[in-house]
Each structure stands twice: as structure tokens, then as C-alpha cells.
Image (cartoon, rainbow, N blue to C red):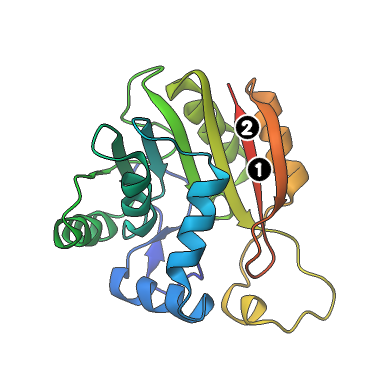
Amino acid sequence: MAETKDRHSAPGTKGRVLHAAAGYDLLVWLFLWGRERAFRERLVTLARLEPGESVLDVGCGTGSLAIAAKRRVGECGVVHGIDASPAMVARAGKKARKAGVDVRFTHGVIESLPVPDGSVDVVLNTVMLHHLPRAAREQGAREMRRVLRSGGRVLAADFGRSTPGEKSLVSRLHRHGRVDVEEVVGLFNGVGLRVVETGAVGVGGMHFVLGAA
């Protein structure tokens, strides 16, 4: 979500990396006005998750969405979260253990996902493309396509462009980057993903693009 001052690039990525895990959860709570559960349920619904599917959450942060995804895909489903920050991965693991759900969290970067080709049904990518320069976005899109099974899906959700004079909480907390929906559509098309649906997430000017392999 909103970027903190505690950031730098991690080995293997050209993007900004958030490391203040505890502060991140607080910012998410403030941004969503305490409606985190409804937001996560909206995302897993947009991704059309089904019981038994395998899910990869790229840029998983502190793991809340991956945990929600695991609850949606059930005991027969598999969820793996990846983040470039070891601090985020550690906090995500603690949250999953506390919640009593089996989600595997790994340190990794979008430019080189530590996942075999064609091994997952759904990739989630939430509020992280704006942290990447253009070349890294393109490489990340290729990697997300690589790990998808035939017929698999990618859901990307991020902040859209602000309007002139915007004074919203999003503008105050999140000044450093946004991604036009048209750019995300272009990234998907460029790696052979068919765009299935686009639209507003319904929170703070965020939009989504759902693509299929």
C-alpha cells in the first residue's frame, strides 16, 4: 500500500522494497478504514478462486491476502506467497501460523520467480506493479505468465492515475507511483495473456485487470 521511508531495492529486483512490516499493516488499516477483510474478499472474488486451485501471491507483503486465498481454495488448494522483503516474509509466516492456515512464504522477486513453469492456477499481484520501473514490470509479467498453467489466471490490482487537485487519503499516503489500467492491459497482452475483465476494485481509486493464459 502506501510506501514508508524504510525502503530500498533488494538483490535481484530494480523495484522499491518495503521492509517496515509492522508499519505496513498499520498503513493498510488506515487506508482501508478497518475494512481489510472486505477488501481481501473482494480481491479473491475478482480472481475467481475455486476450491482446490494453486495460487501464487507475488509481492505478498505481510500475508493477509494469501491467507484469505487459502481459505477460499480450501484444504485441497495450495497457496504460496513471495516477497522481496525478508521482514515481510517473516511476519507473513507468523500471521499464517497464528491463523492456523498452511501457506508457504518465500523470499523472492518478481523478475525471477522461484516457481517452476506452468505450476500454478492463479497469480495474484496486488499494489506492487507501481513499485517497479517499466523494464521490471515487463519482466515480471513474463514471469507471471511463465508459471501459469494452461487456462490459468493473473489478477493485478493497483492504483490508477489521480485526477488534478485530488485531495483524497490515497493522494496523501501514496504519492510515488500509479499504473494506468491501459498499461497493465498492454503488459498482459504483450506476454500472451487474454484480458478477461477490467474495472474498479472499489477502494481508493484502485483498478484491476484479470488475464487468462
- Callout 1: few (<14), some (14-19), or many (20+) C-alpha neighbours within 10 Å? many
What SS does tag 1 mark?
A: strand
Name the residue rendered at 65%, 31% in the picture: 188
Q: Amino acid at mark 2?
A: Gly
**Residue depicted at x 32% and y 27%:** 115
User: In terms of image quadrants, where is residue 202?
Assistant: bottom right
- Placement of 84 over or under 27, stated as above or below: above
Residue lying at the far right in this picture: please name it.
164
Image point (64%, 20%), residue name: 192
The image position of residue 203, as x and y in percent, is 62, 67
Q: Residues within 10 Å of mark 2 (few under 14, many from 20)?
A: many
Asked which quadrant contains residue 78, the reply is top left
131 over 138 or under it: above or below = below
Question: On the rendered image, what quadrant is the C terminus found in?
Answer: top right
* Vertical arrangement, residue 20 with respect to residue 169, above or below: above
Give the structural element (helix, strand or loop) at label 2. Answer: strand
Q: Which residue is mark 1?
A: 209
Evaluate whether residue 121 shows in this view: yes
Left/right of residue 96 with respect to residue 55 in the rendered view:
left
Q: Position of residue 130 (x, y in %)?
A: 59, 54
Kindly report the distance in space between the C-alpha atoms of the residues bearing marks 1 and 2.
6 Å
Q: Residue 16's spot in the image, x, y percent?
A: 47, 57
- Report whether 167 appears left or right of 134: right
Q: In the visual, does 211 lie left or right of 83? A: right
Return the x and y of residue 174 as percentages of the image width and height. Answer: 59, 72
Name the residue tied to disc 2. 211
Q: Are marks 1 and 2 in contact (CB under 8 Å)?
A: yes
Seen from the viewer's position, the closer of residues 184 and 155 is 155
Q: Residue at x 68, y 53 (%)?
A: 179
| Three-letter amino acid code of the residue under disc 1 | Val
